[in-house]
Image: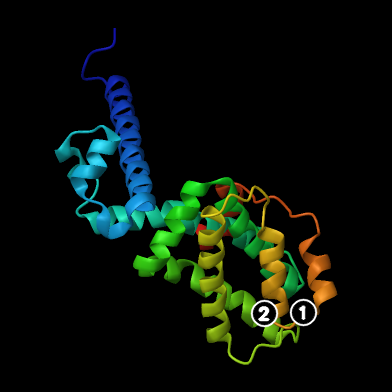
Amino acid sequence: MTTAGSPLVGSSGRGRVGRRRARNRERLVSAAAELMAEAGVEGVTVSAITERADLGAGTFYNYFQSRDGIVDAVVAGAVETLGQRLDALTQGMADAAEIYSSSLRHLMRTAVTDPLWGRLVVRLGIAHDQLIATLGPRARRDLLIGVDSGRFQVPDVDIATAITFGALLSAIHAHLGSDQASDPSGVFAESLLRMVGIPAEEATEITQRPLPPLPSLEEARVILGGDAEG
């Protein structure tokens, strides 16, 4: 007969508690992401987050020490994980133009297919340095690959990185504010390829190629190995 103090029961109880905690944390992060997409980082309060998540006001502090902590969690969930998936997708690509184009097309397409994500990225880009710190180095790396290989003609990589990031946010904002149903990701990537010196006809051809699907986060972490852990 199994007693209440047996390891089996203790393990089961801990498992239930762990699952409940994971669900509550996910509800808080999802609520924060929705509110940040609507009102920006500065417009979000802890009480608004717990109300949207339908959890007690004190529950928040079981998971996060401050509002900044949950903002970081939102960025990690919405942006860093996508960055890891893009890293895995492009890791085996040899052509810098294809690497740059594929990343741009997927970022824009994600905003089109998930408008909440798009609004969140635009809001974070204006108000939160972590978004720039997450995506900026990746854009710079891709541009450097193009410059070092002679594929891109870029006089200043840092300026080109800033232009890439600013263009992404502006294009997402413009699309979400319009009534256009078409996906602008190809045209967006083509425009930036031409900016870095790819001839017009070639830029069109590259951005009209079938876009490889993004690997799942789990697949990405296997492809990237220890670099994606955390």
Q: Is residue 70 left or right of residue 102?
A: left
Q: Position of residue 85 (x, y in %)?
A: 59, 55
Residue at the spot x=66%, y=65% of the render? Answer: 188
Q: Nearer the viewer, residue 108 or 27?
A: 108
Q: CA distance from mark 1 to mark 2?
A: 14 Å
Q: Which residue is mark 2?
A: 145
- Identified by mark 2, the residue type is Ile
Which image quadrant is residue 203 in?
bottom right
Q: Which residue is mark 1?
A: 198
**Residue 114 in sight from this viewpoint:** yes
In the rendered image of this protein, does residue 98 appear above or below residue 185? below
Q: Residue furthest bottom?
A: 155
The kind of secondary structure element at disc 1 is loop
Badge 2 local density, few (<14 within 10 Å), some, or many (20+)? Answer: some
Q: Nearer the viewer, residue 207 or 97?
A: 207
Q: Residue furthest left?
A: 58
